[in-house]
Image (spheres, rainbow, N blue to C red):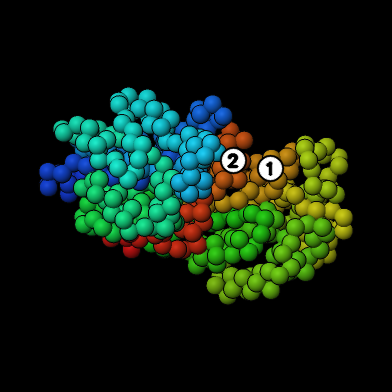
Amino acid sequence: MASDMPKLAPGATRKRNVFDVIEALQKQSAKTILVRVDFNVPMNSDGKITDDSRIRGALPTIKAVVNAKCNAVLVSHMGRPKLVQKAADDEETRQQRHELSLKPVADHLAKLLDQEVLFGDDCLHAQSTIRELPAEGGGVCLLENLRFYKEEEKNGEDFRKTLASYADGYVNDAFGTSHRAHASVAGVPALLPKEVCGIGCLVASELAYLDFKNASSDEQIAAIIGGSKVSTKLPVIEGLLKNVQTLVLQGGLAFTFLKAQGIKIGDSLVEDSMIDTAKDLLKQADSMGKTIILPVDAVCSQSFPKGPMDKADTKTFELNTDAGIDDGWMGLDIGPKSVKIIADGLAKATKIVVNGPAGVFEVPPFDEGTRGLVDAIESLTKNGTVSVVGGGDSVAALEAFGKTEAVSYVSTGGGATLELLAGDILPGVAAIADYD
């Protein structure tokens, strides 16, 4: 059964998965699997789902359970319902409960699966709903928003015991929350036998593409990291230096490294408190024989744009110790020379991971650097390079450029992606006993 899982990247270590869990339960004549999914989807004011990609991402795991004639009890969170957790009964709280209910998700999932999806409106008293699932298996039910209960985020003992009591086995297919040690993520699998706990198809794919600890020595891995601050991406940069051969630093954080090299950056974003750290990281990379690529030119403006800007109002500066950005100008994108140098630096990579755009891609003409890199990565992907894009801004850039199909894989995680890139073991994966 395990052969039905997504193909793993070279060197990736296999973990116990949904098919292993199904096989173990069938030997026990057991049928019910609690599946942690991530249905935290955006909705409009009319309660209509505006992007169902996270729901669709869980379909392979749900269908695997249903097709094996097991019942799937799905649990998820939606938003941050702090008012509901206080158990007040005022109008504002009732409105939040309505807005963050998973009932519309259950209805939408039923259409995608073309079968009935039962809805349990109380995670603490869901037994009656679960008993309605077919005795022969193949049924699906979705319980109400886990975060309506403060015990979920606190990994409360009674709450996790209640969730565990609803099923014979457990599967985690919520990669986006796997970095949280919550009751439904880390608490439930700790209460069930290890042979009936595993990861779903989505989590398996994420680990295969993003977990570098067991990468083959033949792999040439390159990472492109953007973002505004070095301080927020520091663990990622430090972790990646251990596992990649080439590290591209771009976006706002690149200017801290450029200033650390004595290059003038004008009024560009900089963290002066991180200058020494940047110097240390550059020395560390050099001593490890790793290549760090920084921008060599920047497209600049004299003010942060509130909307599209005429290209004539921008200026491109060379970034070296003999030049640099003039005072009164700020770098908002990488220039064409940087795009070429980065593309050339990626040419020999067997895998490329991107987290963070090159500039303010939302505002033309400062989208050209990110667009140029996406085109370069698309070309490399067509020639066999494995390309992975993660992080909200990077994924948004792909969507804005109509290029979501141009890369090998688009990660669904935010914080989970960053922690995995940093080399951390995610609580939601560590809870599955076979993880190493």
Cα gap from disc 1 to disc 2, whole angstroms: 9 Å
Q: Quadrant of the N terminus?
A: top left
- Quarter residue 376 falls in: top right
From this view, report whether residue 155 is shown above or below residue 107.
below
Q: Residue at x 53, y 36 (%)?
A: 91
Q: Is residue 19 left or right of residue 301?
A: left
Instruction: Read off the residue under disc 2.
Output: 396
Identify which residue is drawn at 17% across, 49% down: 24
229 or 287, which is in the foreground? Answer: 229
Quadrant of the image containing the C terminus: bottom left
Q: Which mark is residue 436?
A: none
Q: Name the residue rendered at 48%, 34% in the picture.
A: 98
Extreme-front residue of the structure: 89
Q: How many labels does the image show?
A: 2
Question: Can you say whether 137 is above or below 208 in the image?
Answer: above
Callout 2, which amino acid?
Ala
Helix, strand or loop for disc 2: helix
Q: Where is residue 289 in the image (x, y as percent from the top left)?
A: 56, 70
Q: Which residue is drawn at 48% across and 49% down?
A: 86
Q: Judge from the rendering whether residue 291 lies leftward or rightward of residue 217; answer left or right.
A: right
Task: Give the image location of residue 413, x and y in percent.
Answer: 48, 48
Q: Pinpoint residue 375: horizontal percent, then vertical percent.
A: 61, 41
The three-letter code of the residue at mark 1 reads Phe
| Residue 361 - label | 1
- Answer few, some or many: residues within 10 Å of disc 2's Cα (few below 14, many 20 plus, some between 14 and 19): some
Q: Earlier in the sequence, mark 1 or mark 2?
A: 1
Residue 155 higher or lower than 411, as above or below: below
Q: Is residue 25 left or right of residue 284?
A: left
